Amino acid sequence: MATNLAGELSRTKPVCLIDCDVPQDTSTSWYSVRRAKKPSQNLTAYRVSNGQDLLDFVDKEAGKYKYVILDSPPRITDIGRAIALVSDLIIVPVGASSAEIWASEDVKVMLGQAGEVKGAPLDAHLLWTRYKDYTVLSREIHDEAEKFMGIPSLETTLGYRQAYIEALGSGLTAGETKDKKAQLEVASLCVEVKKLLKQGE
């Protein structure tokens, strides 16, 4: 999700992609491959390993970019808490399975705690990935997750497509692959994110 948003939004505006998922470094690796293939003055990437480094970056550097995209670790850490506090919009990717919803309970707790610190509920949304909207089970799990997490889902869903896997390893976005459905999904995600951010201004 982070790399797709960064690559697509940087087509027209300056974007900074911050990889906070140490030591996995997926976004950093993707950016290195992309920079070698498709150098872009609009896209920059950084790697931060702790919450204080992230807060320092946001304080000193974030104003240089139209969008700053933070790739968060899928677990509760000090950097995850910092991300929740500084973000204007939080997107929680979730697969269409009960196990993934149950595994998101700590994220639910963290979002609640961050909202208490900020003094207002966070603007957070679920993003369904590997989603099959034609199955009854997917729709039931969709409703279960919104109730469990207490946050709404984005209208956009990302299907179970090879294009996302191939794009990540190639330094591309799914919108730059030949998969027409993936192209439409990524374009829809960008439009929805921009709309939500404008509403928050």
Image (spheres, helix red, strand yellow):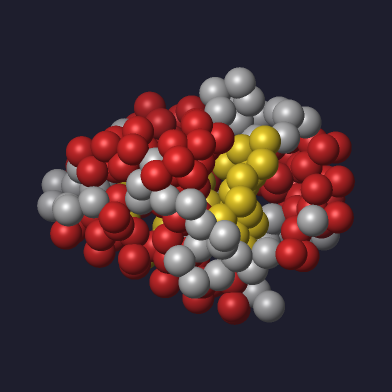
Q: Quadrant of the C terminus?
A: bottom right
Residue 177 is situated, as x and y percent measured from the top left of the image, at 23, 51
Q: Residue at x 42, y 71 (%)?
A: 191
Image position of 150 (left or right of 110): left
Image position of 152 (left or right of 44): left
Q: Residue at x 57, y 41 (%)?
A: 71
Image position of 61 (left or right of 186): right
Image position of 32 (left or right of 61): left
Residue 101 is situated, as x and y percent measured from the top left of the image, at 43, 35
Residue 112 is situated, as x and y percent measured from the top left of the image, at 69, 46
Q: Nearer the viewer, residue 25 or 185?
A: 25
Query: In the figure, residue 75 lies in which quadrant?
Result: top right
Query: In the figure, residue 11 lies in which quadrant?
Result: bottom left
On screen, residue 71 above or below 85? above
Residue lying at the far left of the rendered structure: 134
Q: Residue at x 50, y 62 (%)?
A: 10
Q: Residue at x 86, y 55 (%)?
A: 60
Q: Nearer the viewer, residue 14 or 201?
A: 14
Residue 71 can be seen, yes or no: yes
Q: Nearer the viewer, residue 170 or 163?
A: 170
Residue 76 is situated, as x and y percent measured from the top left of the image, at 66, 29
Residue 145 can be seen, yes or no: no
Report the number of discs: 0
